[in-house]
Image (cartoon, grey):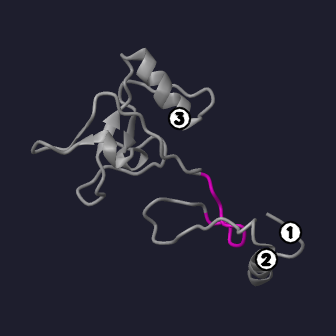
Amino acid sequence: MSTCVFCKTKQSKHCGRSFHKFPVKNVLRLQQWLKEMKRKDWKPNRNSTLCSAHFTNDCFDRTGFLITLKKNSVPTIFDNPKSECSSCHRLREYGRGYSFFKFPLDEPDIMKQWIANINIGPWSP
């Protein structure tokens, strides 16, 4: 069973994702994958995988019976996996049934309302 090294999603019948090994034998492509992940001092091994949630739809070949990752695809969808709720401190985890939203920094009135509603004292995002 595979686990995505970024979001920790585990492969199962019901997860709805495919899992793709890092191109460890293709140094140039591997560098592109690692650059997009923005993980310092991390190296994949031959079993390390990313799930399909980190690839755009055009990265997949859907012409055959199986959906496969195109040869030159590079993952580009990486949210911060360690996001945390400012109020309850729940960690962001994929597939857990709740959503995280960024503070509306460009709308000061709405921002004040958000801060008042979460009631965490003198604090600013």
Cα separation between marks 2 and 3: 32 Å
* Relative depth, front residue between 2 and 23: 23
Q: Which mark is residue 40?
A: none
The magenta segment: 82-90
Cα separation between marks 3 and 1: 32 Å
Q: Is residue 86 above or below residue 57?
A: below
Q: Which of the marked residues, 1 or 2, is nearer the chain's N terminus? A: 2
Q: Secondary structure at mark 1?
A: loop
Q: Which of the marked residues, 3 or 1, is nearer the chain's N terminus? A: 3
The amino acid type, in three-letter code, at marker 1 is Trp
Q: Which residue is mark 1?
A: 123
Q: Which residue is mark 2?
A: 115
Quarter holding the N terminus is: top left
Q: Is residue 20 above or below residue 8?
A: above
* Relative depth, front residue between 40 and 11: 40
Q: Secondary structure at mark 2?
A: helix
Residue 106 point in image, percent of width and height: 75, 66
Residue 41 point in image, percent of width and height: 61, 26
Quarter holding the C terminus is: bottom right
Q: Secondary structure at mark 3?
A: helix
Tags 1 and 2 in contact by the CB under 8 Å rule?
A: yes
Residue 26 point in image, percent of width and height: 37, 17
The amino acid type, in three-letter code, at marker 3 is Glu
Query: What residue is at 45 percent from the left and 71 percent from the top?
Result: 97
